[in-house]
Image (spheres, rainbow, N blue to C red):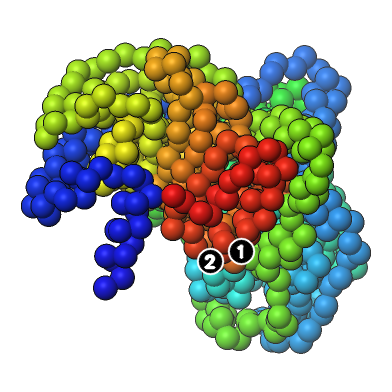
């Protein structure tokens, strides 16, 4: 009952011809099937889009330069450390989080096992976000002793209670060390949807680094160790597996307090990751703009001359197999360790038993040996063989640390988004409006990293079905991107529409027919990561947009720049501005941005399924996987949907079948159009 009125409205809105309105259902279905078959015609295939984005990213990863002296290297390392912290980690509100006072809350102490006890604690990583932790403390302490921060990876519900991590901490304590066992964001007690790593990008959208909570959780953990009376500041170590391996190299390279590090099966160069997709990692491992400053090869070199053991597993069933991951790291870091005459401080260990993704006995004993060689050098009493302690492993319930209500990525983003975008009010006078549009257009181009691509169009054949002629085209942009397109024509078109759909052009048969019936030539295109240009990599497809952002580009900006370039070509080809049409949330944002950065070739915009506000992403608690390009760093800080639409005006921007949120957010745009000399309401479609 609800479908018929919608069809009638849509037919009216798109000015369908009487013949089409009267067409029998069987005939219309046959026509749609024929057009769908034309749109599904394979043009570039599935291999090329992946190859292009791999090449695009790999070429932008910085290489480690050659250095001739320790002084030259140390100056470079200081600069790299400062730039990473200022330009990547502590952007936006994170700069204030960085300066908050230390807050550690010690709780109960429970029995451990022979010779040690376990102290429960929680510490504040940033305002309102507490990290639960356990301190394994020897019962007899005299003088200064080594202190180890043990971090864990993707272990799910067990979190800090995972047995192999407990065993490591127990062994450290039984050897007279202070062992800190910290929970990792998203795991154990910090599990739950708000801590999903893919939700850190909500902070990025607000212009605050989503990486900062991870970094601060590690940095504050080192603060805990440094505050201990018996901790030896010359003997501070960090070790962890997988995501813990990432934590280990990241904090150990950037925080000079870490004197020994053992990342286990936890990272590789961005150049390696581009072609070994299992290594791409979560959002924090591929943070926005990191590769504009350095690569993981640089981080490895920044460990020099401090002892560093790189551990990999020969048959790793997760990621970071040594055959491709290890050599680039050693090749980059070894010359820097050599400058210090500390070649033996950079070591590697390849585990064969069991050889899978693990920090089990063999890997633990390799770590103990490293501790013995550098923290207990010359002490013949030190034994790297593991002390059997299986009966002392405790349950997650026994190791539970009481937590009060905690901030997470979503609550932090919600608070940040409340006052965004900044300077959201539109000018109220014509001169102010003109100046606003000019300055904001430049700002949008910079924010999304827009490019004016040169374009070469190649025709790749044609077919006709049900009176519709399809011309298959390939657009080559700057030698970097190939965008497939199908141009549909019926009769003598009077105008041209460029159609982009979230599910690709193959899903757009019905929309194409409606446009054809309205007298349009329809150019259906699949920009990067949509349709035929989607990156078909099982389970890792949505990780490549993270890598694009990590090397300093923006997936949304690439999509918009591709659409804008095709619009310019189409205008030149057919001597009139085009209408950009979208079908879906992702394509609508790409089309809005394309029209915002291309003022001449785009004459109008039609949006189906658009958001009313970028804040809906946060309110719905999306991860980047739902719509990776929409998490463009700082976009909501400066623009929401209303500001993007206002930027396009006085050109018409039509929101078809607007949601209640669209109606609420954009209700005032009619006045904006009047200010610009045009009577138009984006929410009223005729």
260 left or right of 511 in image: right
Secondary structure beneath label 2:
helix
Where does the N terminus fall, quadrant-wise?
A: bottom left
Would residue 26 appear left or right of 79 to someone viewing this image? Answer: left
Whether residue 419 appears in this view of the structure is: yes
Residues packed near mark 1 inside 10 Å, few (<14), some (14 to 19) or many (20 plus):
few
In percent of width and height, residue 330 lies at 58, 30
Residue 355 position in % (x across, y down)? 40, 50
- Residue under label 1: 664
Q: Where is residue 317 in the image (x, y as percent from the top left)?
A: 37, 50
**Front one among 451 and 360:** 451
Placement of 528 over or under 492, stated as above or below: below
In the image, residue 564 above or below residue 364: above
Is the C-beta separation of discs 1 and 2 under 8 Å? yes
Q: Which residue is drawn at 53% across and 61% down?
A: 622
319 left or right, relative to 42: right
User: Disc 1 versus disc 2: distance between alpha carbons?
Assistant: 6 Å
Q: Which residue is drawn at 57% across and 20% down?
A: 452
Residue for point 69% across, 50% down: 671
Instruction: Answer whether residue 324 is visible to the viewer in this image.
Output: no
Locate residue 395, reporting x and y percent.
Answer: 54, 83
Q: Which of 253 and 91 is in front in this view?
A: 91
Tag 2 residue: 660
Side of 669 relative to 75 (left or right)? left
């Amino acid at each position: 009952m609800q479908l018929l009125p919608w069809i009638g409205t849509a037919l009216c809105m798109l000015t369908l011809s009487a013949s089409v309105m009267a067409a029998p259902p069987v005939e219309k279905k046959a026509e749609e099937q024929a057009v769908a078959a034309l749109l599904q015609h394979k043009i570039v295939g599935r291999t090329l889009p992946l190859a292009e984005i791999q090449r695009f990213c790999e070429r932008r990863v910085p290489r480690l330069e050659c250095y001739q002296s320790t002084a030259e290297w140390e100056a470079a390392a200081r600069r790299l450390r400062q730039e990473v912290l200022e330009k990547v980690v502590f952007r936006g509100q994170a700069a204030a989080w960085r300066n908050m006072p230390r807050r550690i809350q010690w709780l109960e102490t429970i029995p451990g096992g022979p010779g040690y006890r376990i102290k429960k604690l929680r510490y504040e990583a940033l305002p309102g976000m507490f990290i639960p932790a356990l301190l394994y403390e020897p019962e007899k302490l005299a003088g200064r002793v080594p202190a180890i921060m043990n971090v864990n990876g993707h272990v799910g519900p067990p979190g800090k209670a995972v047995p192999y991590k407990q065993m490591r901490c127990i062994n450290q304590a039984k050897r007279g060390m202070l062992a800190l066992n910290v929970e990792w964001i998203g795991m154990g007690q910090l599990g739950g949807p708000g801590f999903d790593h893919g939700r850190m990008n909500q902070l990025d959208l607000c212009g605050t680094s989503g990486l900062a909570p991870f970094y601060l959780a590690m940095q504050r953990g080192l603060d805990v160790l440094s505050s201990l009376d018996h901790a030896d500041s010359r003997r501070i170590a960090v070790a962890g597996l997988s995501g813990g391996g990432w934590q280990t190299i990241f904090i150990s390279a950037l925080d000079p307090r870490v004197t020994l590090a053992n990342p286990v099966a936890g990272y590789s160069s961005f150049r390696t990751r581009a072609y070994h997709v299992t290594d791409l990692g979560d959002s924090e491992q591929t943070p926005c703009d990191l590769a504009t400053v350095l690569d993981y090869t640089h981080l490895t070199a920044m460990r020099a001359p401090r002892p560093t053991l790189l551990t990999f597993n020969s048959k790793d069933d997760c990621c970071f197999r040594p055959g491709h991951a290890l050599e680039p790291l050693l090749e980059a870091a070894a010359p820097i360790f050599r400058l210090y005459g500390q070649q033996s401080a950079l070591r590697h260990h390849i585990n064969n038993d069991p050889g899978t993704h693990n920090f089990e006995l063999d890997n633990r004993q390799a770590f103990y040996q490293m501790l013995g060689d550098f923290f207990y050098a010359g002490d013949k009493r030190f034994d790297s063989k593991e002390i059997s302690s299986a009966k002392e492993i405790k349950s997650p319930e026994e190791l539970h640390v009481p937590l009060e209500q905690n901030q997470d990525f979503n609550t932090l983003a919600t608070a940040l988004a409340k006052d965004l975008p900044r300077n959201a009010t539109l000018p109220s006078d014509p001169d102010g409006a003109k100046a606003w549009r000019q300055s904001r257009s430049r700002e949008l181009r910079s924010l999304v990293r827009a490019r004016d691509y040169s374009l070469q169009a190649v025709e790749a054949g044609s077919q006709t079905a049900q009176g519709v002629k399809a011309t298959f085209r390939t657009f080559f942009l700057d030698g970097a991107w190939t965008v497939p397109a199908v141009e549909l024509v019926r009769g003598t078109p009077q105008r041209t529409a460029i159609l982009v759909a979230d599910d690709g052009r193959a899903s757009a048969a019905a929309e194409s027919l409606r446009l054809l019936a309205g007298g349009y030539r329809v150019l259906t295109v699949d920009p990067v990561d949509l349709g035929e240009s989607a990156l078909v990599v099982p389970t890792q497809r949505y990780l490549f947009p993270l890598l694009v952002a990590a090397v300093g580009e923006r997936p949304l900006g690439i999509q918009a720049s591709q659409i804008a370039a095709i619009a310019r070509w189409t205008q030149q080809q057919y001597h009139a501005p085009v209408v950009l049409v979208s079908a879906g949330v992702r394509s609508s944002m790409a089309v809005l941005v394309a029209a915002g950065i291309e003022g001449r070739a785009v004459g109008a915009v039609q949006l189906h399924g658009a958001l009313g506000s970028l804040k809906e992403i946060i309110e719905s608690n999306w991860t980047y996987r739902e719509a990776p390009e929409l998490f463009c760093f700082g976009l909501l800080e400066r623009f929401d949907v209303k500001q993007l639409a206002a930027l396009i005006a006085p050109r018409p921007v039509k929101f078809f079948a607007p949601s209640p949120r669209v109606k609420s957010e954009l209700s005032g745009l009619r006045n904006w159009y009047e200010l610009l000399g045009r009577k138009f309401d984006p929410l009223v479609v005729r």
